[in-house]
Image (spheres, rainbow, N blue to C red):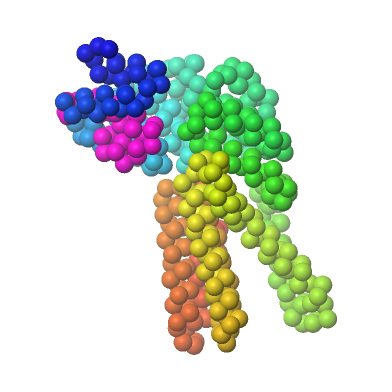
Amino acid sequence: MTDDPVADALELLDDGRVEEALALLKAAVTEEPDAAGLRALYALILADTGHADEAERHADIAVALDDELPFAQFAAGEVAFAQERFSDAIRHASAASELSPDDADPIVLEARARARLGDWDRVRMLAQRAQVLDPGNEGAVMLAAMSDEVETDAPLDDARWQTLVEKFPTNAFARSGRAWAQLQAGKATEARKEFEQALALDPSLGWARDGYIAAIKAQNPLYRGLLSALRRLQHLDPRTRSAVIIGAFVLYQALRFLADANPILRPLIWPLLALYLGFLFVSWLADPLLDLALLARKETRPFISPAAVRAAVYVAAALIAASALALAALLVPWPAGFALAVGAAFTSFTFTAAYGHAVGLMRTRLLRMGWGAVAFLVLAGVAPDPWNGPLFLVAVLMVVVSTWMARTSRT
């Protein structure tokens, strides 16, 4: 050990003695509370070890102490990224890059955050800029590859990711890319093994954690069939895809009208209508419902993201409320209870959209719409005629609009 706490802490980290490094830095920060660099390093390690709130506090103090220290801004950006505060991560990464224009790491951090927000054009530009500064930067290489894949709107190129794995055999991101390519090709078992290797290299990598859970789900034959159907739909050109979706809805409405007008045909038409509605529900709720099941398993629980956990809990709550309303409508002469049960079930779509299809400001908007739909449903349940019908309609419209926003928005 030396008299330099930073050097000593880094040596301890290299040896895998994380707790000792944390204790050393905590003592050093206590002795030198105004040392911005120490605070920043301490914040980074705290974030890596899951102490999110404490990491954010020390990162904020480091920036407040010296907002022109590139490492302080970079550390604050990494902490924000770990907490999924991607706009803050971009702000700090950009500040660090301006203060240290020859350093590729802040540029890669900004690219990672923009990737999570779906800003792939900017990701590509940043990745190329980072590679000019550091041609061997693995993060920049991986993000450049990912941005190219996203632009094509096609399955990941397995051969390309295999090449990256061979070039960077210890890079968890490369292995995750190959695993996702295998998963998209329907090779769920092979993908799961590749994701396990990626997680062995970096247990904190969100792309690998999400992929590992997706691979487990894909081993379920029903879920695999749903994925295949949705993938085929997704690979259609936008005009054709819109025509299929609108056509299916128009056909549903036409069959409903036909069933109402011809009771003799109802036994043939109703199963088709139920199949259509079932597909809609399953396509939106399969992920959170399977996540709910995986939360009960000790070996898979740690790999489910916080957003996925929240989605699963909200969906479970919405479906339990819907079941309770339906049961009450059965036991008590309450015709409106069935409609409210359907409405409560539909609110699960918005909460699934918020945590499964959106981040940042869009997630906040969708959550507000979800709770707004719940509020209007409650009002519809207690309001007298003729107000209950319009209130119920507003709740349903909020769900429809929110799901449309989630599907069409990239932020």
Compared to residue 245, the image places residue 152 above or below, namely above
Residue 273 lies in the magenta-colored region: no
Question: Which of 146/336 is in front?
Answer: 336
- Main SS of the magenta segment? helix
Compared to residue 139, the image places residue 113 above or below, namely below
The residue lying furthest to the front in this view is 298
Left or right, 279 with reference to 269? left
Left or right, 157 with reference to 2? right
Q: Residue at x 51, y 76 (%)?
A: 392
Compared to residue 224, the image places residue 247 above or below, namely below
Percent position of residue 233, x then y: 70, 49
Q: Would you identify the image quadrant in which residue 42 lies?
A: top left
Q: Which residues are magenta?
A: 32-59
Percent position of residue 388, x then y: 49, 82
Q: Residue at x 57, y 87 (%)?
A: 333
Percent position of residue 246, x then y: 68, 61
Q: Residue at x 31, y 20 (%)?
A: 9
